[in-house]
Image (tube, helix red, strand yellow):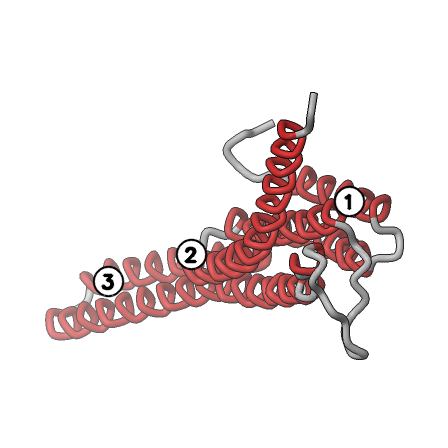
Amino acid sequence: MSYRELDASAIVKTIHTLEQRIRERFPCSGLASVCHELGVVGDTTQRKAKQIAKPNLWLRTLIYVAIVSGIIGLAYTVRILTQSTTIQVGTEVFGFFEGIDAAMHIVVVVGAALFFAISLDDRMKRRHALTDLHVFRTIAHVIDMHQLTKDPSIVLGHYHATAASPKRIMNRFELTRYLDYCSEMLSLTGKLAALYAQSMPDSVVIDAVNDIENLTANLSAKIWQKITILDSLDEKAGSKASELKERAPG
């Protein structure tokens, strides 16, 4: 087991475990369904990341054919130049320059074919990776929508619901756990996206992965602001209880 790279199977296993934790804590929550979808995407990502890392065999075959064709063409040109030495001087000079022109033409054609084949492989992998990475950006926003209405002020006792207000039935502990689950899901979303950069160290793919990681980090930061507020309420409640206990007659 390598500790220098992400283990896709371990990430997927963590997502499935997190889904089970959410279902046990919040059986009727839609967040568990979102986590399930994240696990499905994780299973697909594990397979696709491995496919991207594999070489394209038919393109490599094309490269080898181009190289062999170039070598054969150059050998044929050298042979023509060698045979031209047995011809009279005027024709020899003409044949020599004609052979040089043919050799340069073959080198240019073979080089262009090699560049096209190599760049085509990278472009195909890049296109597939960017298409798959768009899914993580969407899931991150879906997770953010689920935590959007989880307001810490509901545990302060000063909350007045309206007819259009969402149901707020969580206590302080449940709300903290719910927000923590959302933060974990965002972190795992970023780790799944990083698998593509690990499998294909392409500058465009790496930039796309960095954008997703920045998105998930920013959304998670908003969640932790709420968690910090809830923790501060717990600290205030604990300090107030201790103060009342000290003031109580012994």
Q: Give the label, 3 or 1, closer to the camera.
A: 1
- Type of the residue with mark 3: Leu
Observer-nearest of 173 and 156: 156
Number of numbered callouts drawn: 3
Residue sitting farthest toward the left? 89
Q: Quadrant of residue 133?
A: bottom right
Question: In x, y percent, where is residue 139?
Answer: 67, 63
Task: Mark 3 and mark 2 in contact? Answer it, CB < 8 Å.
Answer: no
Question: In x, y percent, where is residue 113?
Answer: 42, 66
Residue at (72%, 55%) from the top-left corner? 38
Density class for disc 3 (Cα within 10 Å; few <14, some 14-19, many ≥20) is some
Give the residue at mark 2. Answer: 67
Task: Mark 1 and mark 2 in contact? Answer it, CB < 8 Å.
Answer: no
Question: In x, y percent, where is residue 194?
Answer: 54, 50
The C terminus lies in which quarter of the figure?
Answer: top right
Give the residue at mark 3. Answer: 81
| Left or right of 89 in this view: 202 | right
| Left or right of 21 in this view: 116 | left
Of the image marks 1 and 2, the number of the one nearer the N terminus: 1
Residue sitting farthest toward the top? 250
Density class for disc 1 (Cα within 10 Å; few <14, some 14-19, many ≥20) is some
- Type of the residue with mark 1: His
Element type at mark 1: helix
